[in-house]
Image: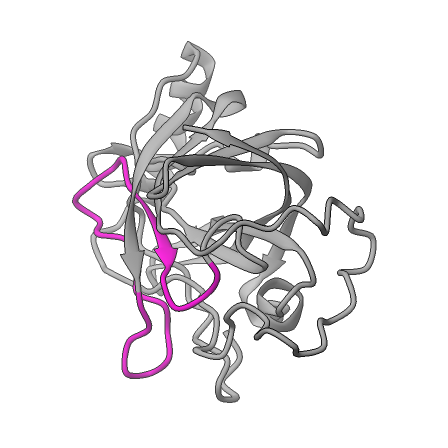
């Protein structure tokens, strides 16, 4: 992350995340990734500043992100904690934990000892609420592939379902999948408040540097809320 406050550190996480089902080809690819990149050193995920929360009632909403579809601005859900994520295209289904910022303003990573877990930044919007909800996960761990290993395979039109504590399921449609170098990570584009309900899925990407125990890039999936139904 940028070292200018309040933007958090952009360092990517040590491998860790969720195990999920896939075709044999994906398993082979995952094992190759693990062999090349796995390390036991903990490192934080990129994270939003504390101010990255839902737009307060009555405040002026920012302009939509350039190139993003208009979505359905009228579809906004009340605040409710996420409890489970499902990405049909990737055969991903995993529970949530909450994430916070540490003393340096960096988002803490999900626990590395659970390969089937994603983290939600609890001081920002909840998935389905107005604003950009931030969900982070690992790509691999020293014991195997993780939940967001295949996140790069999502394409515009892919869907992400998030079941919430209020027993509603919010369905998000992917707008784009972007790869950013850590050194030029666009904090404002990723974490800025939005006029409608959006989602950011974030993981590590690029080449793993054995000397620095860090990945070179971050992968960010941009998505917007398109429907909701009872869980």
Q: Position of residue 223 (x, y in %)?
A: 63, 45
Q: Is residue 47 magenta?
A: no
Q: Position of residue 13 (x, y in %)?
A: 35, 57
At 67% from the left and 56% from the top, the residue drawn is 196
Q: Position of residue 192 (x, y in %)?
A: 62, 70
Looking at the picture, does residue 166 appear above or below residue 124?
above
Q: Quadrant of residue 166?
A: top left
Q: Is residue 110 magenta?
A: yes
Looking at the picture, does residue 21 appear above or below residue 32?
above
Which one is in front, 145 or 55?
55
Q: Could you tell me which quadrant the C terminus lies in?
A: top left
Looking at the picture, does residue 90 appear above or below residue 2?
above
Q: Position of residue 162 (x, y in %)?
A: 45, 37
Seen in the image, is 63 located left or right of residue 119? right
At 57% from the left and 71% from the top, the residue drawn is 183
Q: Which residues are magenta?
A: 100-125
Q: How many marks?
A: 0
- Magenta region, main secondary structure: loop
């Amino acid at each position: 992350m940028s070292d200018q406050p309040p933007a958090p550190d952009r360092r990517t996480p040590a491998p860790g995340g969720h195990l999920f089902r896939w075709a044999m080809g994906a398993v082979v690819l995952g094992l190759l990734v693990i062999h090349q990149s796995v390390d036991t050193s903990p490192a934080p995920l990129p994270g939003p500043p504390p101010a990255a929360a839902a737009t307060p009632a009555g405040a002026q909403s920012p302009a939509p992100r350039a190139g993003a579809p208009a979505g359905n601005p009228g579809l906004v859900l009340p605040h409710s904690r996420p409890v489970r994520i499902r990405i049909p295209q990737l055969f991903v289904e995993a529970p949530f934990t909450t994430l916070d910022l540490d003393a340096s303003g960096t988002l803490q990573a999900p626990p590395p000892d659970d390969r089937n877990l994603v983290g939600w930044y609890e001081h920002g919007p909840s998935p389905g609420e107005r604003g950009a909800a931030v969900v982070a996960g690992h790509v691999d761990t020293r014991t195997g592939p993780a939940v967001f290993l295949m996140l790069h395979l999502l394409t515009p039109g892919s869907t992400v379902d998030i079941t919430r504590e209020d027993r509603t399921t919010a369905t998000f449609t992917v707008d784009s999948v972007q790869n950013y170098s850590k050194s030029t990570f666009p904090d404002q584009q990723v974490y800025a408040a939005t006029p409608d309900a959006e989602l950011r899925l974030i993981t590590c990407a690029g080449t793993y540097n054995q000397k620095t125990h860090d990945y070179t890039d971050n992968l960010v999936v941009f998505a917007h809320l398109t429907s909701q139904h009872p869980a």
